[in-house]
């Protein structure tokens, strides 16, 4: 009897610990305000400032982004120009589709496959695989990207970058609508 109680207690503790480690879902933010409409927010010109931190939390790179965004119906283009702290530049053009029920898909030249996103309340979660060039090689790294609308002008963004399930670092951004 004691053994059964011990096993039951161990199983309950294990399930509780696993539940505590569960990642948030976009539905967790469904009642948060202001309500995000991705197509409305990413329309016009936006500026962003960000940092990339390695897994220890050290800032490895700082950058700015100018985004020229437009939508026609359910299709949007986010034309991003990056300027990094080391003087290098990069361009990424996202082609987004609003699928309904807060769902979006997107493609870009340096994204493998199709990005999938979901908005609810003030939040948007975006998951994709980026083809990241490093020292003459290209690595596929996964992004779990979270955006939170703060007000009609400001959105905060935190993305975790990983490979084979191992966290490589984070990207933190603040977007500002002009």
Image (cartoon, grey):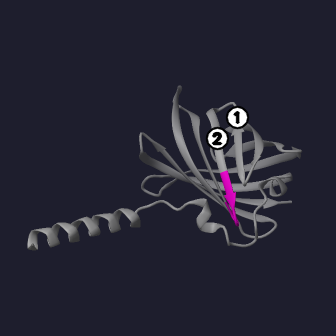
Magenta region: 118-123
* Residue 178, placed above or below residue 76: below
Q: Name the mark nearer the viewer: 1 or 2.
A: 2
Q: Secondary structure at mark 1?
A: loop
Q: Position of residue 154 (x, y in %)?
A: 76, 65
Q: Residue at x 40, y 67 (%)?
A: 20
Q: Measured along the vertical axis of the image, is residue 177 above or below residue 70?
A: below
Q: Position of residue 158 (x, y in %)?
A: 59, 57
Query: Quick check: 118 left or right of 4?
Result: right
Residue 64 shown in magenta: no
Of residues 1 and 37, the one drawn nearer to the viewer in this rendering? 1
Q: In percent of the image, x 60 and y 52: which residue is there?
A: 145
Q: Which residue is mark 1?
A: 108
Considering every residue shown, the one lying at the far left of the view is 2
The answer to whether residue 132 is above or below residue 35 is above
Badge 2 is on which residue? 115
Other-residue count near label 2 (Cα within 10 Å), few / some / many at <14 / 14–19 / ≥20? some
Image coordinates of residue 127 in percent, x first then y, are 59, 46
Task: Determine whether label 1 and label 2 are within 8 Å by CB.
Answer: yes
Q: Main secondary structure of the magenta part?
A: strand
Q: Residues within 10 Å of mark 1 (few under 14, many from 20)?
A: some
In-front residue for pair 52/24: 24
Quarter residue 107 falls in: top right
Please tell me which residue is depicted at 16% across the width and 72% down the height of the picture. Answer: 5
Q: Quadrant of the N terminus?
A: bottom left
Tag 2's secondary structure? strand
User: How far separated are the C-alphas under marks 1 and 2?
Assistant: 9 Å
Quick one: which residue is furthest to the top in this view? 136
């Amino acid at each position: 009897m004691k053994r059964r109680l011990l096993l039951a207690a161990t199983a309950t503790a294990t399930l509780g610990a696993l539940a505590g480690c569960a990642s948030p879902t976009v539905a967790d933010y469904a009642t948060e305000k202001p309500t995000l409409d991705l197509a409305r927010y990413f329309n016009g010109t936006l500026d962003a400032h960000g940092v990339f931190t390695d897994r220890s939390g050290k800032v490895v790179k700082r950058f700015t982004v100018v985004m020229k965004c437009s939508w026609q119906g359910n299709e949007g283009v986010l034309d991003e120009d990056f300027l990094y702290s080391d003087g290098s530049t990069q361009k990424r053009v996202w082609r987004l589709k609003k699928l309904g029920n807060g769902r979006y898909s997107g493609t870009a030249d340096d994204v493998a496959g199709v990005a999938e996103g979901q908005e609810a309340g003030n939040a948007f979660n975006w998951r994709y695989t980026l083809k990241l060039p490093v020292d003459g090689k290209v690595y596929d790294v996964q992004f779990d990207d979270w955006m939170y609308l703060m007000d009609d002008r400001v959105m905060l963004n935190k993305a975790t970058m990983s490979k084979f399930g191992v966290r490589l670092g984070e990207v933190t951004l603040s977007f500002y609508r002009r």
